[in-house]
Amino acid sequence: MTHSKSTSKSNQGGTLYIVATPIGNLKDMTFRAVEVLQHVNVVACEDTRTSHVLLAHYGVKTPTLSFHEHNSTSMIEKLIARLDAGESIALLSDAGTPLISDPGEGLVKAVWAAGHTVVPIPGASATMAALSAAGVATDGFYFAGFLPTKTSERKARIAFLRALPTTLVLFEAPHRIGETLESLNESMGDRTAVIARELTKTHETFHRGTIASLTKEMTDKKPKGEIVLLIEPAAAEGVLNDAAMVDALLKDALSRLPKSAASAEVAKATGLPRQEIYARAITLSEE
């Protein structure tokens, strides 16, 4: 990076831009995103090889550096130093909006703590694209991201999700979608579900059905490409009051929170009395 380039951009210094990029179709880039990428001092990329394709397509020649989950700890200090020096930085993930199931949370917290500004540059979102076209309830939804890979943690997480009275949005890799659907079907039953695959790309498809039917379809077809899974809430009433379900929710909450906070979270999710939930939390903690 030349001195003249750094100086000419210093009037935007001390700012981290969180730049959303296309999730498949390069035409989904916004004018504002291109402008920001052209005028920052450096672009921090999850994978520089992937980002270079996008940057080249739009004629962006700004220097890049690598910022991903394996080097984020060491890179945060260096990026903060550049912001301290009056530079501006754009953060890119491989596709979509950074931090949404992608690295960057630690950096954003550190930038705010250091007294600098963080500016979102919105754009393509796999979650919003899937919700808008899937034909599921969209008056409320819960973004669950990727489920844990460890069996016990996955079961606890699914138990928590089962109790939520809203549309669920999950990400999953194609080689794990069959196994994930089987786990969901065991816990949630045969709910309406949609698999949105390869969004905005040439082979974009929406598979609609139930969790059970999609399990068979995905097992038989062995799909390729990125997947967004949407699951509508159970139609049956009373699912939130199931004792085993309450215990599963509490165990998940207690693994993350003190008893009082965990009880409040579960009481809100189930509609059950907080005192009753707290009493059960004490019992579970002593077992």
Image (cartoon, grey):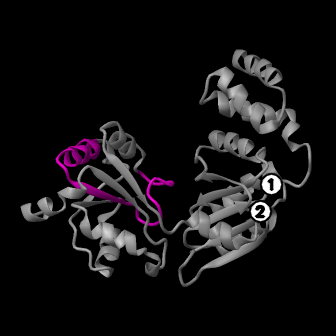
Q: Is residue 156 left or right of residue 42?
A: right
Whether residue 174 is visible to the viewer of this picture, yes or no, is no
Q: On the image, which quarter does residue 43 sit in? A: bottom left
Percent position (x, y) of residue 226? 55, 68
Q: Which residue is mark 1?
A: 233
State which region is magenta.
74-103
Closer to the camera, 171 or 60? 60
Q: Is residue 26 above or below residue 110?
A: below
- Give the farthest residue toward the front: 11
Closer to the camera, 78 or 195? 78
Spatial separation of the CA atoms under disc 1 and disc 2: 9 Å
Q: Which residue is mark 2?
A: 137
Question: Which quadrant: the C terminus?
Answer: top right
Q: Secondary structure at mark 1?
A: loop
Q: On the image, which quarter does residue 217 sit in? A: bottom right
Q: Residues within 10 Å of mark 2 (few under 14, many from 20)?
A: some
Q: Is residue 80 left or right of residue 237?
A: left
Whether residue 250 is visible to the viewer of this picture, yes or no, is yes
Percent position (x, y) of residue 172? 59, 60
Instruction: Return the mark for residue 58.
Output: none
- Give the farthest residue toward the bottom: 202
Question: Which quadrant: the N terminus?
Answer: bottom left
Closer to the camera, 224 or 84? 84
CB contact under 8 Å: marks 1 and 2: yes
Q: Secondary structure at mark 2?
A: loop
